[in-house]
Amino acid sequence: MAHTINEMFTTFAETQPEVLARHWTEAGETEHAIEQWTKAGKAAEARSAFPEAQESYQQALALLSLLPEAPERDLRELELRQSLSFMLQMTRGWAAPEWIKATERVGILAEKSGNLGQLVWSMTWRCFLAYVAGDVLIAGALADQALELALREDSPTALAFLYLLQVSVRHSRGDFSSAEDHFATGLKFFDDPGFRQNPIGGAILVFGTASRNAWIVGRADVARERLAKMMSVVNAANPHDAPLSDTLAATVHTLMKENEHAEVLAARALELCEKHRFPSEAALARIILGYARAELGRAAEGIALIRQGIDGLLKIGARIGITVGFTCLAAAEERAGAIGDALETVEQALQANPDELVCRPETVRLRGELRLKQGQTELAEGDFREAIALAQKMGAKAWELYATMSLARLLAQQGRSDEARSILAEIYAWFTEGFETADLKDAKALLEELAI
């Protein structure tokens, strides 16, 4: 039957390789079946049918395991498992057991091959695995090693992915200046077709992360420019691109206190994630949507969404971003008036992953605000000053501004308006852009109030 289809219905065989693959499988023609299942996987991937592609690659691998061990078989398995890893990353989540198992096998095969290019990809996958698990120090070390090898191999696609990882890891560690440096160096690789066309949305991730990084270092206009660039690389044919870009954009808009816009984007992202079954992105969208709704006065609904998002990340084994999730939850609990619960959640945020420092100054500042509401004035002032010192050390001008405003308000209440005005004027004078944002408008208004 398979021979007949192959010989008499060439067009049918080309357009529906999965049908031919099933017939070859049933006929016991293993080599032909592997070839057609692989072709079916690539065809499904090209039309963004990710679950179908995953199933086809798994069928091909199951049949490949029936062949005798040989270097050629290992190389074929390596190629198939790399393709399968991309699919599992989206259909099962960033740190699902199936994805981890596939990634570990990729590493074994790559090292066995002795090929420099394959070794680079192996280390890249290991770096991403460590990053998603929240092991940002290990991820950073692996990213450095892989980048060194990739520069020798000179593959634009591999370099694009590695600069994405460098930006992501350093941003999460609170090393914002280094993240900016790696983003600038990697720009010449981010237009690489292999990087742009990859289904996981690497270009969206790098511009979205760089936008958030720019906002934190006090460059709001640059953050908006990078968001626009991120939107320009969205592939409408890939159902994963739109919810990913909407979630990342919503995150930046919450930072800018543009919560109405953030709510619209995050709600749309969540709907698409649920429709297409993207568990990792759905979890993040819930956290951002919950935070935006809490800020807009719907605290109880926001708290429930954020908790669901945190549970979603933990369920698939993803720990990166958990500190941000707990900080968002604490802020929502504060909005609901649950100060005791919020303080407990803040401690969870501080202890969940001490090496993930991206929002630590803001978490400490929030603890100060909560303590202030409990009448613990000295502890609150200590938190505000600690948050300022942390932000200054990290070059996180946005977090420094937040914490300085909190301290200035407390000092003013204590009759120390001159000191309050002095510290706030110094950080406000640093900014050269973003004066239309809510933060700088609030800072200016507070300065004028302190001058009276």
Image (cartoon, helix red, strand yellow):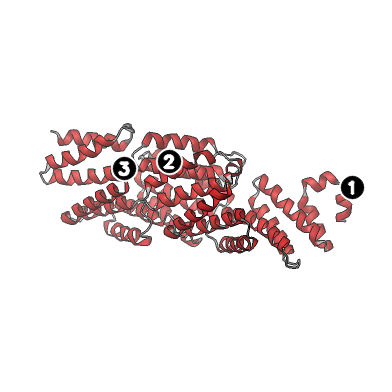
Kindly state the secondary structure of the residue where label 2 is placed. helix
* Residue 56 image-quadrant placement: bottom right
Which numbered disc, 1 or 2, marks the residue closer to the eye?
2
| Residue 225 vs residue 340, the one in the foreground | 225
Q: Is residue 425 left or right of residue 220?
A: left
Q: Is residue 249 visible?
A: no
Asked if labels 2 and 3 touch by Cβ distance under 8 angstroms, the answer is no
- Picture coordinates of residue 297, whole percent (x, y): 34, 45
Question: Which residue lies at the image location 79% right of the left edge and 46% below the top edge?
Answer: 14
Tag 1: residue type? Met
- Picture coordinates of residue 106, whole percent (x, y): 61, 60
Dot 1 or dot 2: first in sequence order is 1
- Picture coordinates of residue 24, whole percent (x, y): 82, 58
Q: Is residue 245 visible?
A: yes
**Most extreme residue toward the left, as rendered?**
415
Asked if labels 1 and 3 touch by Cβ distance under 8 angstroms, the answer is no
Tag 2: residue type? Ser
Which residue matches tag 1?
8
Asked if labels 2 and 1 touch by Cβ distance under 8 angstroms, the answer is no
Mark 1 nearby-residue class (10 Å; few <14, some 14–19, many ≥20): few
User: Which circle marks residue 211 in the picture?
Assistant: 2
Which residue matches tag 3?
398
Find the distance from the CA under tag 3 to the CA under tag 1: 67 Å
Question: Which residue lies at the image location 66% right of the left edge and 58% below the top edge?
Answer: 78
Tag 3: residue type? Ala
